[in-house]
Image (tube, rainbow, N blue to C red):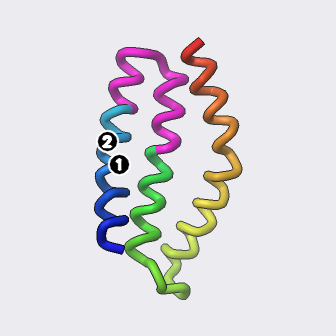
Amino acid sequence: MCFSLEMSTFMLILGSFTTVVAYKKINKNVALMFGFFTIMQAIHVVGYLTLNDCDNIYNKMASYSNYSHICFQPLFNLIGFLGLM
């Protein structure tokens, strides 16, 4: 679990940086796509911190957020790809 938490935290930091660079250098649609996937890493960090604690409210919120995030991934992918065209 420790390595997964460290990697998700690293990807959260890298994604935040990439989102800012994309917003300044490319356009807001691409930044929106990167930002959406950066939010996924934040959800994963919360999930790893509350792993195996099913009664924890943050674990439940992370699980529902993961589900909602996965449902909207295709939409944000298309928005980002539209920004590249």
Tell me the amino acid under the disc marked 2.
Answer: Leu
Question: Quick check: is 35 in the magenta stretch?
Answer: yes
Q: Quadrant of the N terminus?
A: bottom left
Going by the picture, which residue comes out furthest to the top? 85
Query: Helix or strand or loop: what does disc 2 sit on?
Result: helix
Q: Residue at x 37, y 57 (%)?
A: 8
Q: Residue at x 40, y 63 (%)?
A: 45
Front-most of 57 and 43? Answer: 43
What segment is highlighted magenta in the picture? Answer: 19-37
Tell me the amino acid under the disc marked 1.
Answer: Met
Q: Residue at x 57, y 26 (%)?
A: 80
Q: Is residue 77 left or right of residue 6?
A: right
What residue would you read off at disc 2?
14
What residue would you read off at disc 1?
11
- Of helix, strand and loop, which mostly describes the magenta segment? helix
How many residues crowd around disc 1 within 10 Å: few (fewer than 14), some, or many (20 or more)?
A: some
Could you tell me residue 39's position as x and y percent?
A: 47, 49
Q: Is residue 70 left or right of residue 49?
A: right
Going by the picture, which residue comes out furthest to the front? 3
Q: From what the image shows, is residue 13 above or below residue 25?
A: below
Q: From what the image shows, is residue 70 above or below residue 82?
A: below
Q: Residue at x 59, y 69 (%)?
A: 63
* Tags 2 and 1 touching, CB below 8 Å: yes
Could you tell me residue 46's position as x and y percent?
A: 42, 67
- Which numbered dot is residue 52? none
Query: Helix or strand or loop: what does disc 1 sit on?
Result: helix
Question: Quick check: is 29 in the magenta stretch?
Answer: yes
Front-most of 28 and 18? Answer: 18
Real-space Cα separation, disc 2 to disc 1, in angstroms: 5 Å
Image-quadrant location for residue 17:
top left
Image-quadrant location for residue 14:
top left
